[in-house]
Amino acid sequence: MSGEVIKFPEGFYWGAATSAHQVEGGNRNDWSEWELESSKLKVKSAKLREWPDYIFKNYPNPLQEENYISGRACDHYNRFREDFDIAKRLGHNAHRFSIEWSRVEPEEGKFDEAAIEHYRQVIAALRERGMEPFVTLWHYTLPQWFARRGGWLHPRAVTDFSRYAKRVTAEYGREVRFWITKNEPETFVRHAYLVGDRPPQQRNIFTTYRVLRRLLAAHRAAYDALKSKDPTAQVGFAETKVYFEPYRRLPHHMLTMKAVKWWRNNPLYRDFAARSDFIGLEYYFHSRIRLNPFTSRWAIQDNEDREVSDLGWEIYPQGLYHVLDELRSYRKPIYIVENGVADAADNQRASFIRRHVEAVARALHEGIDVRGYFYWSLLDNFEWQLGFWPRFGLVEVDYTTLERKIRPSAWEYKKIIEANAVERG
Ligand code: BGC
């Protein structure tokens, strides 16, 4: 019923998420190296596309090399206190961020005390502002020594990751309750080893699967390492789930959809979840899948004429309810650790958040154990291979002056948080 107010449980976590490489600036890892090598080529291929005008209103844009180089990003490494002040003003009671492995362990086996101290201060700054930290250990980027050695395929990759995990828990275990070992393992392997548009830019289906298995092993090892240091820690993983439907309810589209869904929602999902105290869900969009046997892309998404974001992703809030429903059988607490929209004009964001939160309310009402919601992202940031132009932030960042400007939708989100309730629209 429209106008009905739906309450959230006491202690529900509300906040936003970020990841180190996307906001910190000044990183030296496999990505920063790759960005310098690939930016010229990206500008060239961007020129071949048609872009809507609004993209050029902001700096940088897809036709500029700076767009593809993370550089100083949002300078969040130096401005985290100021950024957390904003999150606090916006009513957040939790915040998800990631530790940059390449800073903490810049050389194999050698930990950097200053970087360790830095993240201690980040955690303290959140606590001082009454925000619960949700800490991700790995959000795509790798130390250069690890990447040069062959990345996740190296025989010592898993033990090295677990050594890093142990060190981090030994340092911050008492201050942090919620840990996320891995961010989106399937997305990582698909881009880096199958599609080849992210480092190390390989295209091999067997390697893709091998790396996914490695990430599972690394997740398990990190889980065990964290739990052995602190049995009360809550340790999970984060994976995205797309809500899939067939383009039409015809057998060939349905079969194609099933195959795409099996892979895209991570074929090892159950194994990841089995060694986790909670599930970190990321939800962005909906896809209608269609078999297309006459072209090289046999399965295509058909989202024409729908409500889409600046990235062309279909906005489909009820999909969040459906993916939550699919997770019911795991019988684990669920935290929505990412859900957001690229919307430079801020026309869609407030309604995007409200309608997705409504979908969460519906899931809660039906007994699904959801305990938190983190909007992606607190700040505009470096959107990986696409660069800076997609604008996901509750807070706009001017990349020339680094000035922050709170978007109107962020205040709308605050109203939901303060009421700990959402009104059905
Ligand atoms: C990732 C983020 C990314 C966001 C939007 C998620 O897949 O975890 O790093 O910025 O989606 O694409």
Image: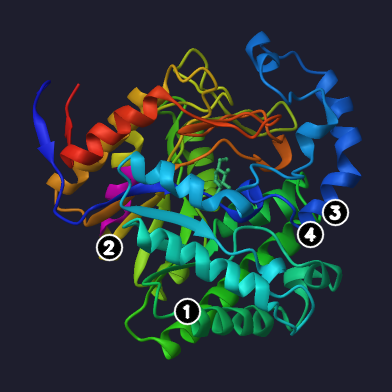
Which element is circle 2 on?
Answer: loop
Residue pictured at 30% horizontal, 64% vertical: 330
Tell me the quadrant of the picture where the N terminus can be found. Answer: top left
Q: Which residue is mark 3?
A: 33
Mark 3–mark 4 contact, CB under 8 Å? Answer: yes
Crowding around mark 2 (Cα neighbors within 10 Å: few <14, some 14 to 19, many 20+) is: some
Q: Which residue is mark 1?
A: 223
Crowding around mark 4 (Cα neighbors within 10 Å: few <14, some 14 to 19, many 20+) is: some
Task: Give how far across and how far down residue 23 sits, in percent.
Answer: 62, 47
Task: Give how far across and how far down residue 174 sits, in percent.
Answer: 39, 80
For marks 2 and 1, the one nearer the N-term is 1
* Residue 422 in view: yes
Amino acid of disc 4:
Arg
Which element is circle 3 on?
Answer: helix
Distance of label 1 from label 3 (alpha carbons): 30 Å
Amino acid of disc 2:
Pro
Distance of label 3 from label 4 (alpha carbons): 7 Å
Which element is circle 1 on?
Answer: helix
Magenta region, residue range? 322-328
For marks 3 and 4, the one nearer the N-term is 4
Mark linked to residue 117: none
Mark 1–mark 4 contact, CB under 8 Å? Answer: no
Mark 2–mark 4 contact, CB under 8 Å? Answer: no
Distance of label 2 from label 1 (alpha carbons): 16 Å
- Left/right of residue 36 with respect to residue 3 in the rendered view: right
Q: Which residue is mark 4?
A: 28
